[in-house]
Image: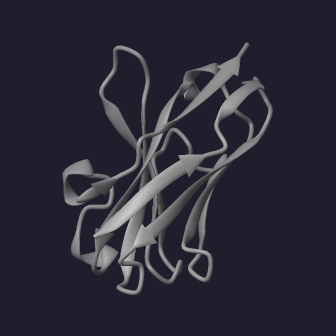
Amino acid sequence: QVQLVESGGGLVQAGGSLRISCAASGRTSSRYAMGWFRQAPGKERDFAAAISWRGSRTYYADSVKGRFTVSRDNTQNTVYLQMNSLKPEDTAVYYCAARYGFISDIDPSNGSEYGYWGQGTQVTVSS
């Protein structure tokens, strides 16, 4: 199995940028798709972005498309979420999630497709 640890969250002003990371350990030799989800206080967890094992396929929620970029460095077993033009409504705990296998086999926006989750990192955007 794989263990995930997010980092890089913090407080940023609206319009600013932040990059959060997700470091994987454990069974990282097998290919795995990665997703980023977020949960604001009092709201359900929402999909933000996802990326295939080789990084050739990326997926974004409409709410972040054009502002967020997901990428990965498999030599470092790390996935990134670059967030630009941040808005107060982007405030949430951000979670990374992993699923072994091909991302094309699943609905990448469905959190139940992922078997492994990190503990989350808080992102707060002030207005």
- Quarter of the picture containing the N terminus is bottom left
- Tell me: residue 104, above or below residue 85: below
- Tell me: residue 62, above or below residue 11: below
Q: Where is residue 21 drawn, in percent x and y?
A: 61, 54
Residue at (80% x, 33% y) in the render: 16
- Tell me: residue 94, above or below residue 23: above
- Quarter of the picture containing the C terminus is top right
Tell me if 90 is positioned left or right of 27 in this view. right
Front in this rendered view, residue 57 or 123: 123
Front in this rendered view, residue 73 or 1: 1
So how many labels did they put on this image? 0
Q: Where is residue 115 drawn, in percent x and y?
A: 23, 59
Which residue ends up furthest to the front in the rendered image?
26
Q: Where is residue 82 drawn, in percent x and y?
A: 68, 52
Colour scheme of the rendered structure: one colour
Residue at (42% x, 64% y) in the render: 34
Q: Where is residue 101 drawn, in percent x and y?
A: 27, 80
**Residue 84 appears in which quarter of the rendering?**
top right
Residue at (44% x, 79% y) in the render: 53
Tell me if 21 is positioned left or right of 27 in this view. right
**Residue 33 appears in which quarter of the rendering?**
bottom left
Residue at (38% x, 61% y) in the render: 3
Front in this rendered view, residue 57 or 53: 53
Tell me if 126 is positioned left or right of 78 in this view. right
